[in-house]
Amino acid sequence: MSIGRELPEANMSTWLGKQPLVLALLAKLSPYILIFSLWCFIWTAWMVGIRGWSIQGSVLLLITAQVLLITAYALFAAMMVLALKDVNTGLSTVAMYAGSSLSFAGVTLPTIGAPLFTRIWSNSLPYTAYSKIQTQQWVVGSPLHTSLSSFLILIGFVIGFTLLTLLLLQRFKKLNPA
């Protein structure tokens, strides 16, 4: 939403200014990432401290994966708003993408033996990688190396969405010099 407010050309040019694009993007998204990460941390602390659930594996890996998940979806939202140049359409696209996560991540419905489209869609969602880490670390207590591939996939989503978002910002800056 914060990037969508900058969509009028004058606002975008002012926002981007002469600063490096990565800093402009970080400045816009970091408050949201920090707030939602804090919320996840509080939820995790509540589940463990108040509800008595125990984390069988690595708390650090679980919390880091939560931050990566939130960062990936924040970057995806920024990317879609910039690509579609419309806040409502961009965020509607994000809702379709992120909203299907629980159904297609193999959490509520199995994806083993599912049709090809289902498996492709499942693997295109950051939540799929995160849900594997959450199950492996919170419930099962798997060794760290078991969660490494899912962790690297989450990092890949963050890097990929960052690069695509920066490309969109670069394109705008090139077409609309300040």
Image (cartoon, rainbow, N blue to C red):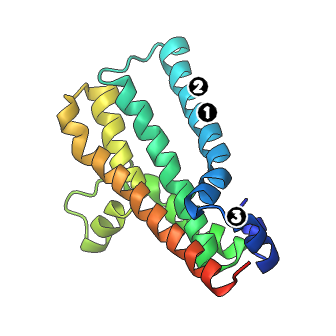
Q: Would you call the spot at circle 3 few (<14 residues within 10 Å), some (14-19), or many (20 or more)?
A: some
Three-letter code, disc 2 = Ile
- Amino acid at dot 3: Ile
Name the secondary structure under disc 1: helix
Residue 130 in picture, x, y percent from top left: 38, 45
Which one is in front, 88 or 3? 3
Distance (Cα) linking label 1 and label 2: 5 Å
Question: Three-letter amino acid code at disc 1?
Answer: Trp
Q: Is residue 99 visible?
A: no
**Left or right: residue 176 compared with residue 114:** right
Which of the image's four quarters has the C terminus?
bottom right
Residue 21 vertical placement versus 30 (above, below): below
Measured Cα–Cα span from mark 1 to mark 3: 22 Å
Q: Quadrant of residue 148?
A: top left
Callouts 1 and 2 close, C-beta under 8 Å:
yes
Return the mark for residue 42: 2
Mark closer to the chain start, 1 or 3: 3
Q: Is residue 58 left or right of residue 35?
A: left
Mark 3 or 2, nearer chain start = 3
Q: Is residue 128 above or below residue 123?
A: above
Residue indicated by mark 3? 3
Q: Is residue 10 visible?
A: yes
Q: Residue at x 77, y 79 (%)?
A: 9
Element on which disc 3 rests? loop
Instruction: Determine which residue is flagged by label 1.
Output: 39
Residue placed at 59% from the left, 44% from the top?
33
Dots 3, 2 in contact, CB < 8 A: no
Which of the two discs, 3 and 2, sits closer to the camera? Answer: 3
Q: Is residue 58 above or below residue 75?
A: above
Q: Nearer the viewer, residue 113 or 159?
A: 159
Q: Do the residues under discs 1 and 3 have CB atoms within 8 angstroms?
A: no
